[in-house]
Image (cartoon, rainbow, N blue to C red):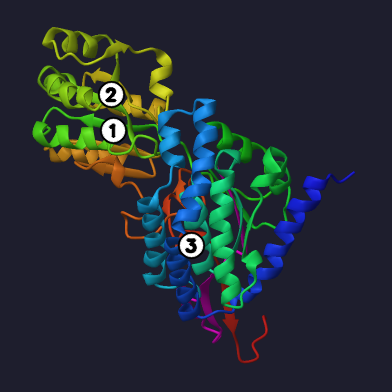
Amino acid sequence: METPVTTAVLAAARAAKDAQPALARLHRGTKDRVLLAMAEALVERAAEIVDANARDLAAADASGIAPGLRDRLALDAQRVAAIAQQLRDAAALPDPIGEVVRGSVLENGLELREVRVPMGVIGMVYEARPNVTVDAAGLALKAGSAVVLRGGSAALHSNTALIAVLRSVLAAHDLPEDLIVGIDEHGREGVDVLMRARGLVDVLIPRGGAGLIRRVVENSLVPVIETGTGKTHVLIDASADLDQAVRIVVNAKTQRVGVCNALETLLVHQDIAEEALPLLAAPLAEAGVRLHAEERASAILAAAGTGAEVIEAVAEDWDTEYLALELAVKVVDDLDEALAHIRAHSTGHTESILTRDAPSQQRFLGEVDSAVVMANASTRFSDGGEFGFGAEIGISTQKLHARGPMGLREITASKWLVVGQGQVRP
């Protein structure tokens, strides 16, 4: 027997599917005007959005939410303005729909073109990240797709307010409001229904903690693009510029801790560890970072008397995405050990090497099998906005369809157009 939640979620998905053709017919200029109007509406109604967010924050504080997760959840006027700017950035990007991916003319005269087309209906499942509500809706709109959003109970009031603003702009432009629908009110059961809505939802993108992503990947009947957790690594190689290394490591760990591209494990080559670790300890300690150090790293830090808070690393630390002011630290014998450690413990998100040795840099870039691999740069740059994609819908750690930061092109499909002059197959 169909439950009320099943009925409601399937109705929302069906409404989005029915609305999508209206968007697919729009020219770029119209889509961009709608995105810009949405940006203006968000800024104009920022106080309303922040008030709704305050209700979510009060509930989160009462439940003892972790600081990193609270940071993701929190909105103020400045953050609302930044979210609105993401929509403006998306409006400024080329429209991917209709772009010719490749084409040719066969010997028999048939003209072939592969062109980008909308996915159709994109389902997003995420946690305590109200900015994703706007990013996903804006990118989906630009890419010609409707979107069904499930942003979690922790952000219920924030998401409801944001979706109401976006839908009001759609209505003002004579577009179906159901191009953007939210199902937060239906809780976990709503997610279960969404995962079974094959035929109504074309692709499902989970974005959040490991548990959420695993649940969707393992149970969804709808095709899934997996956005992985960010167990990111930085290796300070023997030849690293230490002044540069300190800036990069502190930025990667502390610039914003509750995000998937924040540094979680620091590997330090033994030849430079006695010099590097004390230099790093002071600014990390000043930022409030606690170090989970293995034996060699702990001994160096203790001998240097840095005053940093250091605890003994345990096996679980090498696989933990802290999303907090915590950092796992390990001294490695050489590049081979560092590469082996990353292979064993990476989630395939982002890794970076700090080095002045060209062969080491080349080996690291070539051998590390992650979606984003860097040299001499902070992992915080692993982001669709920083890559120039406009807002991103997530960072894919899988290898099919899309990998790495996903912008407009990554949330389109393609189709083949074949034009003939009466040819038949012999």
Q: In x, y percent, where is residue 124?
A: 58, 50
Q: Which mark is residue 253?
A: 1
Earlier sequence position, callout 1 versus callout 3: 3
Task: Name the residue located 32 percent from the left edge and 56 percent from the top edge.
Answer: 387
Residue, disc 3: 139
Report the Cα–Cα distance between label 3 and label 2. 35 Å
Local SS, label 2: loop
- Between 359 and 424, the one lying in front of the other is 359
Sequence-wise first label, 3 or 2: 3
Q: Is residue 325 above or below residue 220?
A: above
Tags 1 and 3 touching, CB below 8 Å? no
The boundaries of the magenta stretch are: 98-127
Circle nearer the N terminus (1, 2): 1
Q: Quadrant of the C terminus?
A: bottom right
- Given the image, on which type of amino acid does mark 2 rest? Val
Q: Which quadrant of the structure image shows residue 235?
A: top left
Q: Amino acid at mark 1?
A: Lys
Disc 1 + disc 2, Cβ < 8 Å: yes
Left/right placement of residue 391 relative to residue 60 reads left
Q: Secondary structure at mark 1?
A: helix
Decide: few, some or many residues near mark 3? Use Cα within 10 Å; few <14, some 14-19, many ≥20.
Answer: many
How many labels were placed on the picture?
3
Q: Tell me which residue sits at (29%, 47%) in the image.
A: 381
